[in-house]
Amino acid sequence: MQKYALLSVSDKTGLVPFARSLVETYAFTLLSTGGTAQMLRDENIPVMDVSERTGFPEMMDGRVKTLHPRIHGGLLCLRGNPDHLAAAEEHGIEMIDLVVVNLYPFEETVVRNGVPLEEAIEQIDIGGPSMLRSAAKNYRDVTVVCDPDDYERVLHGLNQHGPALDQLRSELAQKVFARTAAYDSAIATYLEKSQQVEPDLDSISGFPKVLEVSAAKSMPLRYGENPHQQAALYGGFLDHFEQLQGKELSYNNILDISSSAYLVGEFERPTVAILK
């Protein structure tokens, strides 16, 4: 039975060796779109355009590419359900066994100063999250990958069967829903900030109407507020600071660093803050 993998990525890190392994080692037929398909062809990796599968060309400046029953049917079909299989056969839907998608760089776009709203909106991915969520919902039958860091793990997992493969697919699906939740949160936060509305108590106070927090783990901390407590640091804190020496940081060290930064931020001239 032919195995299909659907690849459509913005971050192409590690894609070529991964795709080559899928074809040469695991005998997958690759489906792809746009720039991803072109990159694979440039590397002499055989690939089929999604439009060949759907019968529809990419349209509307690439906004509509993969939103089609022959794609999502192949992702959502329960392989053990006779009715699903009969419907797939009736409508010419072939199963897709592996999905590799990462999303348009919306977060990276909107952090740049002066980005027009129109440019930000064009970086809102629609087809990517849809494919990820369809595949993740059906993770018992479909392996879904949203992070290039998982490529090697997935290649190893393709040799597995039974509980080991089920566990891998479950973990990857959970990662997908965490990623799409963070992505949607970033979009909602950006659009809320971009809206011109009449001031209300929330905006005057500086507090959002809905607080959504989604942050990646940056590092474990030596301990929490007290030595017997565990702690970890999340978010982009380390993007702004570099530890030059000393032991691993604790929760209290992070608070001290933050206080120092806010303190010197109150001055316009070069300033040093020392907290002990």
Image: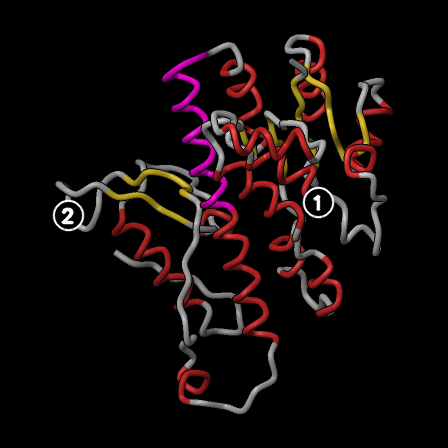
Q: For the stretch drawn in magenta, what is the main secondary structure?
A: helix
**Residue in the image at 42% along x and 62% along y:** 212
Q: Is residue 156 magenta?
A: no
* In the foreground, 69 or 97: 69
Colouring method of the image: secondary structure
Q: How many marks?
A: 2
**Residue in the image at 64% along x and 61% along y:** 110
From where the camera sits, is residue 50 visible? yes
Tell me if 27 is positioned left or right of 167 in this view. Answer: right
Whether label 2 touches label 1, CB < 8 Å? no
Q: Give the extent of the magenta segment.
A: 161-179
Q: Give the answer, above or below, for where 130 lies relative to 269.
A: above
Q: Position of residue 79 (x, y in %)?
A: 52, 26
* In the foreground, 7 or 213: 7
Q: Quadrant of residue 135?
A: top right
Of the 4 image quadrants, the one containing the N terminus is top right
Q: Position of residue 136 (x, y in %)?
A: 50, 37
* Helix, strand or loop status at disc 1: loop
Tell me if 37 is positioned left or right of 244 in this view. Answer: right
Q: Position of residue 275 (x, y in %)?
A: 30, 58
The residue type indicated by label 1 comes to: His
The residue type indicated by label 2 comes to: Asn
Q: Position of residue 4 (x, y in %)?
A: 67, 23
Q: Is residue 166 magenta?
A: yes
Label drawn at residue 189: none
Q: What residue did someone put label 1 on?
A: 68
Q: Earlier in the sequence, mark 2 or mark 1?
A: 1
Classed neighbour count for the residue bearing mark 1: other residues with Cα under 10 Å, few (<14), some (14–19), many (≥20): some
Q: Quadrant of residue 200?
A: bottom left
Q: What residue did someone put label 2 on?
A: 226
